[in-house]
Image (spheres, rainbow, N blue to C red):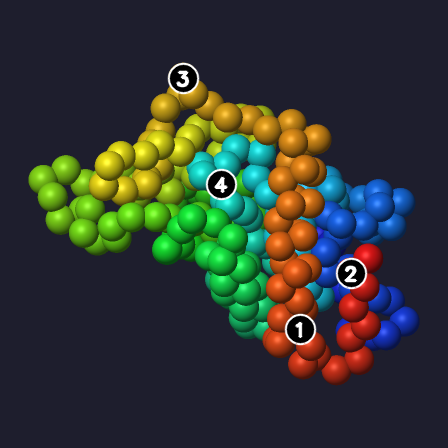
Amino acid sequence: MPSLPPAPHCAGQPLQVFPALLPVERQSPSVYPFGRWPLPAAGVMFTTPLSFVSVTMSPIAPGHVLIMPRSNVARLTDLPPLELADMAQVAQHVARVFERRLPVNAFSFAIQDGAAAGQTVSCVHMHLLPRKGRSVAAAEEGPAVDNRTAALASADPPPSGATAVASSSSETQHTALDPSKRIVKSRAEQAVEAREYAGWLQEAGVPDFLRSQPGLQLETL
């Protein structure tokens, strides 16, 4: 599948910042590229001229989303500086909104860059994973390494299935790999989740880093 070019910075072609809230006939494009896999627009909850945010079909925990550049390149080292900066600002914005909406107090931001790092879809993407409880560092000081690190390394499943689910203990909310409890959300379920998150982001308003872009016309509904 060809890469989706960055949205133009011109008033004649408005940017749909909250596509999950738009009627299907007004969602453009109908799919977003994720390596060679098409992601339906209904699962995309936020876009910028350079990046977009999608729910995942196999979330590790509530609020687990993917942040991707529109250029659909395979490696972080291939990503132009402006797109890398935009992806980071989007991650920051989504995390701020989610921390106000979810019972969490921390986030993991993970990028598997290359097959040896656990990347199974050849497209740069960042996992944003809400957390609650003691820090990863504190959990890893004990005799056994907390399995959250291993879970993040495996948080990048192929679109055909999921490998991670959420679990909890009295000390911390963390992730656990349990093949017997794999969660795979349908497209309809993903669309419902995306609409909820898009609503949160819409209520938060357009972030400053987008408003500062000259000549950009925003369309949210």
The residue at 36%/24% (across/down) is 178
For label 2, the crowd category at 10 Å Cα-Cα, with few meaning under 14, some 14 to 19 and many 20 or more, is: some
For label 4, the crowd category at 10 Å Cα-Cα, with few meaning under 14, some 14 to 19 and many 20 or more, is: some
Image height check: is 28 above or below 146? below
Q: Are marks 2 and 3 in contact (CB under 8 Å)?
A: no
Q: Amino acid at mark 1?
A: Leu
Between disc 3 and disc 4, whose residue precedes? 4
Image height check: is 9 above or below 136? below
**Which of the image's four quarters has the C terminus?**
bottom right
Q: Are marks 4 and 2 in contact (CB under 8 Å)?
A: no
The residue at 44%/37% (across/down) is 60
For label 3, the crowd category at 10 Å Cα-Cα, with few meaning under 14, some 14 to 19 and many 20 or more, is: few
SS for dot 2: loop
Between disc 1 and disc 4, whose residue precedes? 4
The residue singled out by tag 1 in the image is 210
Question: Can you give x and y, in whole percent of width and height, for residue 207 in the image?
Answer: 62, 71
- The answer to whether residue 94 is visible is yes
Q: Are marks 2 and 1 in contact (CB under 8 Å)?
A: no
Q: Amino acid at mark 2?
A: Thr
Q: Amino acid at mark 4?
A: Pro
Which marked residue is nearer to the observer: mark 2 or mark 3? 2
The residue singled out by tag 4 in the image is 62
The residue at 19%/41% (across/down) is 145
Q: How many circles with numbers are drawn on the protein?
A: 4
Q: Amino acid at mark 3?
A: Ser
Image height check: is 19 above or below 48? above
How much space separates mark 3 and mark 4, taking CA atoms?
19 Å
Between disc 2 and disc 1, whose residue precedes? 1
The residue singled out by tag 2 in the image is 220
